[in-house]
Every structure is written in structure tokens, then in C-alpha cells.
Image (spheres, rainbow, N blue to C red):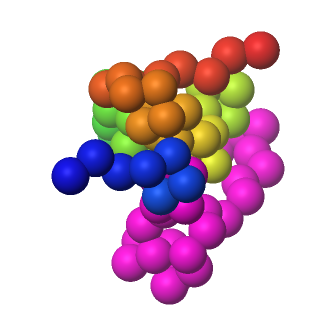
Amino acid sequence: MKKKQDTKLVHSGSYPEKQGGSVNPPIYHASTVSKPSVAALEIARNEPDTNFMYGRHGTPTSRAFEETVAALEGGEKCVAVG
């Protein structure tokens, strides 16, 4: 069954089980993200979709937005720029 646009808007990018129970994704204001070690930084560089290293390259907030736009457009992924 196809999801209606309203349903996509409400549910895309929302993961309450990973967000402390919050239905809506929290807003992350981050220009710089610290890492505990060089090894952790290397992991972040190699896995940019799940490990964040610099706010300009994306945060959990921008990933939730991109996921919602992709769902609305019927796409697999989306990249927000600008």
C-alpha cells in the first residue's frame, strides 16, 4: 500500500527509539563535532551518513530533512545544499 504524502511527512526521518522517545528529530546546531581519537575521526570520514565530523557536511537534523524530501519525491536518497 502506498503511503499518502501526509503520512510521509509525519513519519520520514523520525526514529523515536534512537531519539530518546521524541517523535520529532531534535535540532542539532553544530559547526564542529569533536571526536575522542584520531581513529574515531577516520571512522567518521569513511562513514559520513552515520558518523558526523563537521556540521557543514551534515548533522542528524539535515539527514532527517533529506530523508523526508527523498520520501516525498519517491527517491532513494537526497542531498540538501545551499
For residue 26, say whether it is visible.
Answer: yes
Residue 73 x %, y %:
47, 26
Q: Is residue 41 above or below residue 7?
A: above
Instruction: Depth check: give the residue in front, 72 or 15.
Output: 72
Q: Position of residue 50 (x, y in %)?
A: 38, 43
Residue 21 included in the magenta stretch of the image: yes
Which residue lies most toward the left here?
A: 1
Question: In which quarter of the view is residue 10 placed?
Answer: bottom right
| Residue 70 rendering spot, x and y as whole percentages | 45, 30
In this view, the residue in front, 58 or 33, is: 58
Taking the spot 21% from the left edge, 52% from the top edge, the residue there is 1
Which secondary structure is most common in the magenta stretch? loop
Task: Point out residue 38 in the picture as x, y percentages from the top left corner.
Answer: 42, 37
Stretch in magenta? 8-37
Q: Within the image, what quadrant is residue 76 found in?
A: top left
At horizontal 71% and vertical 54% (from top left) the residue drawn is: 28
Q: Is residue 81 left or right of residue 64?
A: right
Q: Where the C terminus falls, by quadrant?
A: top right
- Is 24 above or below relative to 13? below
Residue occupying the point 61% across, 68% down: 24
- Which residue is nearer to you in this view: 66 or 10? 10
x 36%, y 24%: residue: 75
